């Protein structure tokens, strides 16, 4: 159970990190497309 909890918590951290990256990437892309 401890391993499963640890991997689940790690997955949640990874998902949160990727959500942040995607939001940042979309924001940058939108700004570039809006500028051009």
Image (cartoon, rainbow, N blue to C red):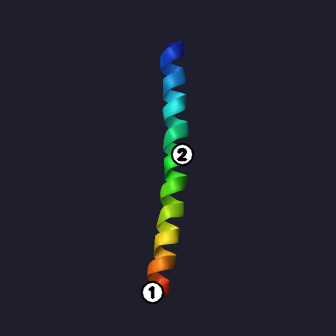
Name which of mark 1 and mark 2 comes first in the sequence. Answer: 2
Q: Nearer the viewer, residue 2 or 23?
A: 23
| Mark 2 lies on residue | 16
Assign a secondary structure to mark 2. helix
Label 2 crowd (10 A; few <14 / some 14-19 / many >=20): few
Residue 14 on image: x %, y %: 51, 39
Q: Position of residue 29 (x, y in %)?
A: 46, 71
User: 7 above or below 30?
Assistant: above
> Relative to 18, is 8 above or below?
above
Asked whether 21 or 7 is in front, the reply is 21
Vertical arrangement, residue 21 with respect to residue 28, above or below: above
Residue 5 location, x and y as percent?
A: 52, 21
Check disc 1 and report the residue beneath it: 36
Q: Secondary structure at mark 1?
A: loop
Spot the residue most to the bottom. 36
Q: Residue at x 48, y 78 (%)?
A: 32
Give the x, y percent position of residue 30.
47, 75
- Report the number of discs: 2
């Amino acid at each position: 159970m401890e391993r499963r909890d640890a991997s689940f918590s790690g997955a949640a951290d990874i998902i949160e990190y990727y959500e942040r990256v995607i939001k940042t990437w979309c924001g940058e892309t939108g700004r570039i497309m809006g500028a051009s």
